[in-house]
Image (cartoon, helix red, strand yellow):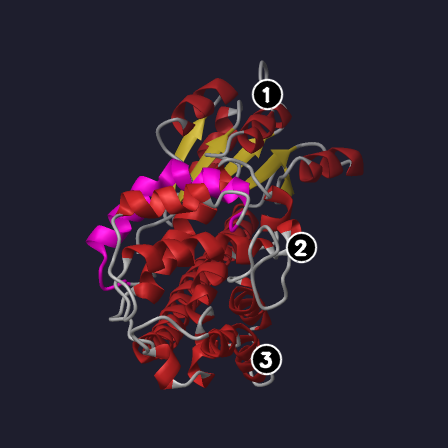
């Protein structure tokens, strides 16, 4: 193992010689007879410990340690004061400024060696603990990411099965996640609804979009896959997928630990068909009565429905989707989100064109 490096700073040549002779068999030792010289050396080399005399001309030990602690590069270096002063006030001052120990001169060489050995061992153990904590944090983050990816994959598979039941050929769920992240990031960048959004976990919000149509599991295939226009009774039936979705998520909540994710999902499921003018369903909410996340999902869901082929319609081009959403500003959609959508609609088009399979954003 490479020996540790110790700097000795003292204006007394005898003390420097004794210190160097005592420590040189166990450590790399550098001696300095002034504060200026050690500060210059610290720009090129950082030691493992500094033995620092308090009483020196020009720059004393208190001035040196103050500079050390003010510099991020040197503040972590352990400093032991060497001094002829034995009064409590001087010792307390040194320790208060960040010194780890206080050795009275003339010092006993064996005692000096042992004190340094103990302090370097403590510093080494502190570093090992810090490294362990950092590695543990990395491990936790990696494990969390893996769990999130697995959870996302399972939920996406379940959601895509719902999509396939109503004739969607796949990709809707993944694309809505991508659209959602773009629109929410734009909202945050431009400072809209900042207070409410500050409480969100954005990754969980985006992930929870997977369950916005989960209530369709309770709708008959004959309605979901009908190629023509729905009757009034059939439309009333399909509208129930919003409240069915809330019920499904509530059942999941009873056995799940992650309530935040499910609360977001429940909002998406129950409110993504509400309209700004109050003509939507299931509750006919109006304006800001509609949850914020429901208002975002309304645009995301409608855009993808317009540009995608469904059993009852052909896919329309991006330009028509933009025109339809703009036409419904203040009717179907929150005007704020229509304006945000228009500012990033080219990104929506890019997602629709380049991500037909709806690959996950995770």
Image disc number at residue 250: 3
Determine whether the residue tagged by mark 3 lies in a helix, strand or loop: helix
Crowding around mark 2 (Cα neighbors within 10 Å: few <14, some 14 to 19, many 20+) is few
| Between 118 and 358, the one nearer to me in the picture | 358
Residue 353 forms part of the magenta stretch: yes
- Judged by depth in the image, the label closer to the viewer, 1 or 3, is 3
Coordinates of residue 225 in the picture (x, y in percent)? 32, 78
- The residue sitting at 38% across, 75% down in the picture is 159
> Is 57 above or below relative to 6?
above
Image disc number at residue 56: 1
- The residue sitting at 51% across, 21% down in the picture is 35
Locate residue 219 relative to residue 267 in the image: left or right: left
Provide the residue span drawn in magenta: 332-359
Crowding around mark 1 (Cα neighbors within 10 Å: few <14, some 14 to 19, many 20+) is some
Q: Where the N terminus falls, by quadrant? A: bottom left
Coordinates of residue 292 in the picture (x, y in percent)? 58, 53
Earlier along the polypeptide chain: callout 3 or callout 2?
A: 3
One can see residue 213 in this view: yes
């Amino acid at each position: 193992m490479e020996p540790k490096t110790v700097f000795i700073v003292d204006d007394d040549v005898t003390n420097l010689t004794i210190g160097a002779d005592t420590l040189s068999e166990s450590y790399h030792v550098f001696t300095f007879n002034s504060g200026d010289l050690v500060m210059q050396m610290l720009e090129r080399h950082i030691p493992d410990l500094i033995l620092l005399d308090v009483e020196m001309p020009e720059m004393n030990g208190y001035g040196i340690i103050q500079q050390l602690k003010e510099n991020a590069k040197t503040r972590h270096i352990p400093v032991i004061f060497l001094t002829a002063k034995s009064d409590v006030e001087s010792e307390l001052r040194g320790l208060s400024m960040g010194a780890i120990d206080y050795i009275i001169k003339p010092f006993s060489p064996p005692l000096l060696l042992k004190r340094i050995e103990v302090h370097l061992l403590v510093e080494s153990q502190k570093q090992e603990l810090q490294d362990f904590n950092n590695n543990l944090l990395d491990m936790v983050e990696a494990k969390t990411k893996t769990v999130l990816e697995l959870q996302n994959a399972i939920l996406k598979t379940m959601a895509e099965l719902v999509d396939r039941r109503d004739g969607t050929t796949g990709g809707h769920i993944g694309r809505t996640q991508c659209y959602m992240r773009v629109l929410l990031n734009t909202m945050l960048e431009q400072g809209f609804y900042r207070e409410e959004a500050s409480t969100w976990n954005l990754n969980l919000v985006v992930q929870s979009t997977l369950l916005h149509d989960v209530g369709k599991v309770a709708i008959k295939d004959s309605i979901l896959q009908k190629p023509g226009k729905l009757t009034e009774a059939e439309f009333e039936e399909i509208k129930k997928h919003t409240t069915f979705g809330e019920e499904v998520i509530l059942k999941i909540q009873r056995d799940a630990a992650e309530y935040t994710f499910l609360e977001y999902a429940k909002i998406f499921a129950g409110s993504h068909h509400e309209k700004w003018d109050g003509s939507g369903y299931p509750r006919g909410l109006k304006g800001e009565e509609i949850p914020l996340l429901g208002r975002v999902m309304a645009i995301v869901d409608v855009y993808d429905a317009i540009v995608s082929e469904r059993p009852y319609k052909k896919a329309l081009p991006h330009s028509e989707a933009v025109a339809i959403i703009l036409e419904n500003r203040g009717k179907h959609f929150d005007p704020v989100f229509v304006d945000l959508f228009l500012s990033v609609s080219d990104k929506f088009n890019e997602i629709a064109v380049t991500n037909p399979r709806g690959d996950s954003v995770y």
